[in-house]
Image (cartoon, grey):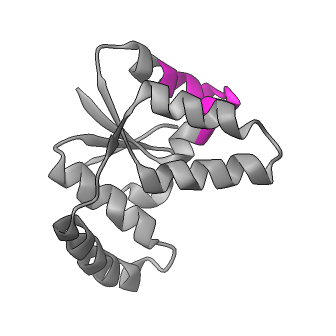
Amino acid sequence: MRYLIDSSAWIEYLNGSGQGEEINKLLEGDNEILVLSLNIAEVISYVKRNKNNVELAYNSIIKNSKVLQITPKIAKDAGLLHADFKKQNPGFSLADAFMIVSAQNFLCRLVTIDNHFKDFKEAILIK
C-alpha cells in the first residue's frame, strides 16, 4: 500500500506516542511511504521550536520515505481546493490542500492525526 504521511503523523511518530506507534507499524510493513518536502519543513520547524534533535528528525523521515515532487498541476489544483474548502473550514491551510491533492495524484492514502481531513476519502485518521 502507498501512504502519504502528514506532518502531524510524523510528529507523533518522532514523539513515540501511541498514535506514533501506528505510524511505526506502517513503516515496518511492506508499504511505500511518501512525504512532501513541505511536510519535512513543518516537522523540522516543530522539532526546532521544541528544542529537540533536528538532524535525528530529518534523517528519520528521509530514511523511511520517498520525497514527492510538487508539479505545477498539483500546485494549481491545491490552490483551487484551498479556495473552495477554506470557505467552509477557515482552519484549512494551503499545506493541507497540497496533501489532499498529492494523495489524489499519487494514488495513495493520506495518514494524519488532524481531524480537519475527516471529510476527505483519501485520509486515514489515526486516533
Rendering coords of residue 55 (x, y %): 67, 35
Q: Quadrant of the N terminus?
A: top left
- In front: 77, or 125? 77
The overriding secondary structure of the stretch rendered in magenta is helix
Quarter of the view holding residue 29: top left
Q: Is residue 60 visible?
A: yes
Residue at the spot 29% in from the left edge and 21% down from the top edge: 31
- In front: 107, or 60? 60
Q: Is residue 121 visible?
A: no
- In front: 84, or 108? 108
Magenta-colored span: 11-24
- Position of residue 97 in the picture relative to residue 13 (left or right): left
Rendering coords of residue 37 (x, y %): 43, 51
Residue at the spot 47% in from the left edge and 37% down from the top edge: 126
Residue 32 painted magenta = no
Residue at the spot 35% in from the left edge and 66% down from the top edge: 97
